[in-house]
Structures are given as C-alpha cells and as structure tokens.
Image (cartoon, rainbow, N blue to C red):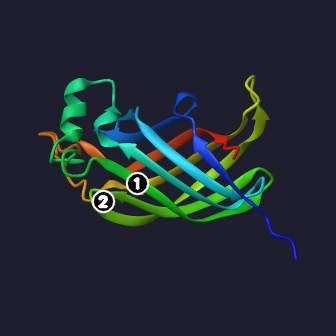
C-alpha cells in the first residue's frame, strides 16, 4: 500500500491576477480587479486532481480604474468592506475534465453569504524558475449572480436602461509556488 505525500503550494501574488467583468447600462462592460489576495493549494504529490484550494480577496483592494466607483463598491451599498473585509473561496472538488483541464467547485463567500460556484480551470503547466522553485500556473473562469450574494444595488435610467447587470464574470490567472519542507 503506497501513500502519497501532500504537496503544499502558496499563491504568488506578484505573478497572479484576479479580475471581474460586469455589464454597465447593458451596452458596455466594466472590468475590475482585486489587488491584494492570498491563496493556498494542497495536492496529492504532483497531481492536481482533488487538490484543496483556498483563496482570500481583500475587498479594500478593489480597483476598477475609477476611485469614486471603487469607494461606492466598498460602501454598504455593495461589499460593505468595513463589516465584510474579505471574499473567501474554499474548494469542495477539483476534478480533471480533459488534458490540462479541470473543473473547480467550491464555496464562495461574499458579505457573509456562501454559495457554490463552478470554475473552469486550465493548467498552463509547471516549471522551475531561476531560484529553483517549482511553479504551477492556472487560468480559471466562471460567473456568478451578484444578487445571490446580497449585492443588490441597482437602478434604472430615465430612458429605462438598467444601470448594472446581475451576472459577474470571474477570471483568475494564478501562479502557485511549491513549498519545500
């Protein structure tokens, strides 16, 4: 009977990005990101199937390239950053769906509301860097309905256009560093 040693990985924020997109006035898309985040992954050896993934995003680090809008998003009308300073994700399954492709399912918590979310993940590969550290890269994509997480602010213009869409597209480009004991 063989036992596989757990491999620990830590997210490298210098080589990672967390983005979101949402429709504005139904005619264009606003893109934003979180600048401060952390994450870990624990896998069985060098296989990523069934890995346990945890991510934490700091709400105060939201950036849509517009300071006034960012303050609005941090306010009680949206994320309510003082009371709910972090968005959290904890995986419940990470299954291989094809060559270098995975389905990541987990619990996403925003404003103290937790819902299951599914992300499509592409493993970009694993490489050793100049300092002999093993790195693994992943791109993940999915979508959520913001209203299911209590992000219900909205409005309608005088002409009847909806100010903000409900669907939020998520895009993560992350790199993890293998931890050596």
Lateral position of residue 77 relative to residue 50, left or right: left
- Mark 1 vs mark 2: give the one in front: 1
Q: Which residue is mark 1?
A: 88
> Looking at the image, can residue 166 be seen?
no
**Residue 13 place in picture, x, y as percent:** 52, 33
Q: Which mark is residue 47?
A: none
Foreground residue among 26 and 134? 134
Judge left or right: residue 112 versus residue 131.
left
Quadrant containing the N terminus is: bottom right
Q: Is residue 123 rendered to the left or right of residue 154?
A: right
Query: To which quarter of the image does residue 31 belong?
Result: top left
Residue 168 place in picture, x, y as percent: 40, 48
SS at badge 1: strand
State the SS at label 2: helix
Q: Earlier in the sequence, mark 1 or mark 2?
A: 1
Going 65% across and 51% down the picture, which residue do you hit? 8
As drawn, which residue projects farthest toward the front? 181
Write the residue at 54% across / 41% down: 172
> In front: 68, or 178?
178
- Residue for point 40% across, 35% down: 36
Q: Name the residue carrying label 2.
A: 149
x%, y% of residue 109? 36, 59
- Percent position of residue 155, x then y: 16, 46
Q: CA distance from mark 1 to mark 2?
A: 12 Å
Q: Residue furthest right?
A: 1
């Amino acid at each position: 009977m063989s036992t596989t040693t757990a491999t620990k990985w830590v997210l490298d924020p210098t080589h990672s990005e967390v983005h979101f997109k949402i429709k504005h006035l139904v005619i264009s898309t606003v893109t934003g990101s979180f600048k401060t985040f952390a994450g870990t992954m624990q896998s069985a050896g060098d296989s990523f199937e069934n890995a346990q993934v945890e991510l934490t995003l700091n709400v105060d680090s939201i950036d849509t390239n517009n300071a006034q809008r960012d303050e609005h998003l941090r306010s009680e009308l949206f994320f309510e950053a003082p009371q709910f300073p972090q968005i959290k994700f904890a995986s419940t399954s990470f299954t291989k769906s094809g060559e270098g492709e995975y389905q990541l399912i987990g619990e996403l918590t925003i404003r103290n509301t937790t819902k299951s979310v599914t992300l499509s993940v592409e493993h970009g590969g694993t490489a050793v860097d100049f300092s002999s550290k093993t790195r693994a890269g992943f791109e993940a994509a999915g979508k959520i309905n913001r209203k299911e997480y209590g992000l219900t602010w909205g409005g309608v213009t005088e002409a009847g256009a909806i100010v903000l869409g409900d669907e939020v597209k998520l895009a993560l480009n992350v790199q993890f560093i293998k931890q050596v004991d």
